[in-house]
Amino acid sequence: MTTYLDLIPKTDVEQSAKDFKSDQEVRWCPGCGDYSILSNVQGFLPELGLARENIVFVSGIGCSSRFPYYMNTFGMHSIHGRAPAIATGLAVSRPDLSIWVITGDGDALSIGGNHLIHALRRNVNLKILLFNNRIYGLTKGQYSPTSEQGKITKSTPEGSLDYSFNPVSLALGAEATFVARTIDSDRKHMTDVLRAAANHEGTALVEIYQNCNIFNDGAWEPLKDGDTRDDVMMRLVDGEPIRFGKDMEKGVIRTADGHIAVANVAEVGEDAVIRHDAHAKDPGLAFALSRLSNPRTLENTPIGVFRDIERPSYDRLVRDQLAEVQAKQGTGDLQALIDGGDTWIVS
């Protein structure tokens, strides 16, 4: 069986990150985490060996959505929250394209919530990079759907009352076939996750914890600080026991009531520690892992690939259905379709 990458024209020219840098001045605030994401993507794409004219970046609205301007590929800075809808049209009609959606926590999860959910459940062949800085940066610092409860911002001076969205939980609940999380400050980890997403057929959602040093500086600091990082962040590796801590002293176990929890490995024994299975058909463990982290302290935060399963992509199913209908009925007559049924002439 051919993969979707087999349908995309390859280049016989050796590429480097420089080939994917456009001539546009990068206009993000100095120190913004978007720079590292851009650099990682530009550095990673040459690995795919795809012709640049067959790669497309579609974005919505927000700081992250300037991304297509800085890529020397095709792209579109589209409509607030609607990037998945526009990208879906491209994916269904053009199997020869590698299509990436760039969005932020506000763009994807507020006005774009429904578009994101339905792209995920349909398994459209898109790679969605969701930059999550837990704030509205472009509009200067209002709370976003991922801001923690109690967050004091310009729009919530007494603290946000909203219960925050968890993008990974949302994606798993929508039956996404590939769901991952990475962080802007870990280049190697992000590249590994991007590589896995790029090779996945269907919708791949990658949440990227990204710092906004102007309006929400330090939002993910416990996951970046060398003194705290190993104690609060667990790295998910398929087939490996889920352990973390400076001395790998913590592990994820199944409790007597069927839930999962973090325990001291010395107390429960190594055999009690759960092995991560990103390819499990049942998303139950992946969903449970996505709920482990504390949204305030960021304790027990998993990063890595939560789920990676095979299911035919929506666009492949559409092409197969059209081919089946054409084989049975022959080439359709568009004019007959327009003229068929009840018609009216309005004068």
Image (cartoon, rainbow, N blue to C red):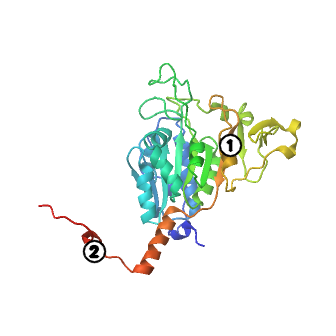
Residue 146: quadrant of the picture: top right
Mark number displayed over residue 215? none
Q: Residue at x 47, y 76 (%)?
A: 324
> Within 10 angstroms of label 1, few (less than 14), some, or many (20 or more) residues?
some
* Number of residues whose C-alpha sits closer than 10 Å to that of mark 2, classed few (under 14), some (14–19) or many (20 or more): few
Decide if residue 53 is on the left or right side of residue 178: left
Tell me the SS state at disc 2: helix
Q: Is residue 245 visible?
A: no
Most foreground residue, 40 or 255: 255
Q: Nearer the viewer, mark 1 or mark 2?
A: 2
**Residue toward you, 315 or 43:** 315
**Residue at which label 2 appears:** 336
Farthest left residue in view:
347
Q: Amino acid at mark 2?
A: Ala
Q: Secondary structure at mark 1?
A: helix
Q: Amino acid at mark 1?
A: Ala
Look at 48% across and 24% down and name the residue there: 153
Which residue was labeled with disc 1?
Answer: 288
The Cα–Cα distance between marks 1 and 2, rounded to whole angstroms, is 53 Å
Q: Is residue 319 visible?
A: yes
In the depicted view, which residue is nearer to us: 12 or 1? 1
Question: Residue 329's spot in the image, x, y percent?
Answer: 40, 79
Q: Position of residue 8 (x, y in %)?
A: 51, 68
